[in-house]
Image: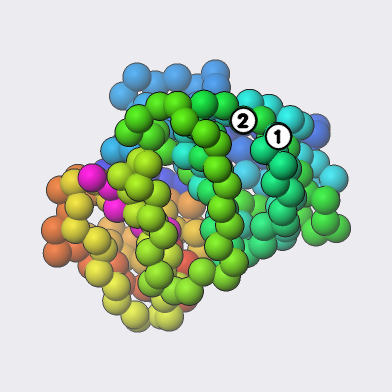
Amino acid sequence: MDVRRADERYPGGDRSAGIESWHAFSFGPHYDPDNLRFGALIACNEEQLAPGAGFDEHPHSHTEIVTWVVEGELTHRDTAGHETVVRAGDVQRLSSAGGVRHVERNDGDAPLTFVQMWLAPRDPGGEPSYEIVRGIADSTPYAVPEAGAMLHVRRLAAGERTAVPDGAYVYVHVVRGAVRLGGEELGAGDAARVTAAEDVDAVAVTAAEVLLWEMS
């Protein structure tokens, strides 16, 4: 188990434009050849957008992009004709496939915080697709078969225990609160990369929200 703390993330964004970004993997000018990916996961970015701030239209290709809103509202528009507002508890996935462009903005009056995770598909190319699951229920897995991955969302009360999925690669990201995992306490923004996970439990130290990626 490899624990990465929130304060070890690479800073990014543009504060003068109301954008703060924190990257768990090599991203943009931050290049570490030993931190390019874990399983299918190639990015896990914490993004904070001030009201009115956002990312102008930009391209993606050959990437599965999954977004989890922590607080606020995210406006998404893409060149495939989708326009949605993503809120806390929703899972959004953009399969960029052979290529798509999109815009991400905070058009609301309150600050926006979201976690965006990029996964490498098993096979490149294809047609772009988009999906949003409103208010996904606790413990309901969300499959990204294109990347051989499954997202598990857990919302835990203090003292509650949950099993970490067995898998070749499991990525655990703490959205809020604190959990104990394999003898380590993880707080908000901390993550653990577990290889060959088997019979691992997470116990909530406080009320917590956790994202777990199970990857083959």
Q: Is residue 181 magenta?
A: no
Q: Is 163 drawn above or below residue 6 in the view shown?
A: below
Q: Is residue 214 magenta?
A: yes
Are discs 2 and 1 less than 8 Å apart at CB? Answer: yes
Find disc 1 in the rendering and name its residue. Answer: 79
Q: Is residue 74 left or right of residue 64?
A: right
Element class at badge 1: loop
Q: Residues within 10 Å of mark 2 (few under 14, many from 20)?
A: many
Q: How many tags in the picture?
A: 2
Determine the main secondary structure of the stretch shown in magenta: strand
Q: Which residue does the image show at 83% across and 56% down from the upper left?
A: 108
Q: Is residue 37 left or right of residue 130?
A: left
Find disc 2 in the rendering and name its residue. Answer: 100
Which residues lie in the magenta part?
A: 211-216
Q: Residues within 10 Å of mark 1 (few under 14, many from 20)?
A: some
Q: Which residue does the image show at 47% across and 67% down from the upper left?
A: 209
Residue 198 lies, in percent from the top left, at: 14, 58
Residue 59 lies, in percent from the top left, at: 63, 26
Residue 69 found in image quarter: bottom right
Q: Which residue does the image show at 38% across and 55% down from the upper left?
A: 143
| Three-letter residue code for mark 1 | Thr
| Three-letter residue code for mark 2 | Val
